Image (spheres, rainbow, N blue to C red):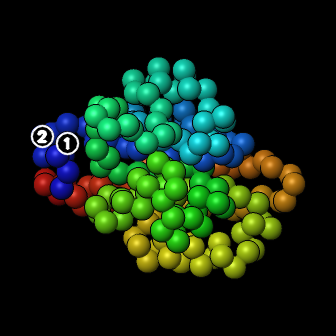
Amino acid sequence: MTESNVQGKKPFLYVVVCAAGVADDVGKLITQAQERHWDVGVIATPQGLGFLDAEAIQSQTGYPIRSAWRTPGEARPLPPADAIAVAPATFNTINKWAAGISDTLALGILCEAYGMGIPTVVLPYLNAAQAAHPAYQRSLKRLREMGVLIGSYKPHRPKAGGGADRFGWTEAVDLLEPALNQHRPDS
């Protein structure tokens, strides 16, 4: 049970955004979450920052985008997460996360989320050649074992990009709501 749920406040969703062509549509996920009465903050991987319209996202969420660690004494710019959606999630981030590598703020948050019991969903976005790599399948298996919910996106053709019209932004909230409701005191 999280503090925000105890106090009757809106649940807070962290959206972790990776460097992928569909990342500039993350506003669709933010809108969906806000329509379902969630507050949202965005954490971008260092490379993912370049794929986002930071001003538009900050205007939509009311919070700054986080990408780097805070300095000692710096205030926390986001409330604690009640749930996390990693969307879009790249081959690199999925494999590092499953291996417990915490070399960026985004990965640090994801690695900690497991130990804190924070419901987490991942919406992979990668090509079929990357998905064929044995490390990727092992990583998905490890994440499932950790309780991470995995989205249904089917990898696109290599060197073709695309799939933006098939990327299911709203699937993140659909998958997280039941998990979050299990943590609420009134369920």
Q: Which residue is drawn at 20% across and 51% down?
A: 2
Q: Is residue 156 above or below residue 15?
A: below
Residue 72 on image: x %, y %: 32, 38
Tag shown at residue 17: none
- Amino acid tagged 2: Gln
Outermost right residue: 159
Q: In this view, does 103 lie to the left or right of 127?
A: left
Residue at image position (18%, 55%) is 1
Q: Position of residue 113 (x, y in %)?
A: 36, 59
| Residue 175 visible somewhere in the drawing | no
Q: Closest to the observer: 178 or 89?
A: 89
- Residue 4 - label: 1
Q: Quadrant of residue 120?
A: bottom left
Q: Is mark 2 on a helix, strand or loop?
A: loop
Q: Residue beneath label 2, please?
A: 7
Quadrant housing residue 50: top right
Which is more toward the observer, 6 or 44? 44
The quarter of the rendered structure image containing the C terminus is: bottom left
The answer to whether residue 166 is left or right of residue 102 is: right
- Which residue is rendered at x = 86% and y = 52% of the image? 160
Q: In the rendering, at what x and y percent does residue 178 appear?
A: 33, 58
Residue at 66% x, 61% y is 91
Instruction: Give SS at disc 1.
Output: helix
Query: Does residue 117 appear in this view?
Result: yes
Place of residue 133 in the rendered image (x, y in percent of width and height, measured from the top left)? 73, 75
Residue 175 lies, with reference to residue 165, above or below; the image says below
Is there CB contact under 8 Å for labels 1 and 2?
Answer: yes
Question: Is 69 or 8 nearer to us in this picture?
Answer: 69
Seen in the picture, residue 15 relative to 140 is either above or below; the reply is above
**Marks 1 and 2, how far apart in space?**
5 Å
Mark 1, other Cα within 10 Å: few <14 / some 14–19 / many ≥20: some
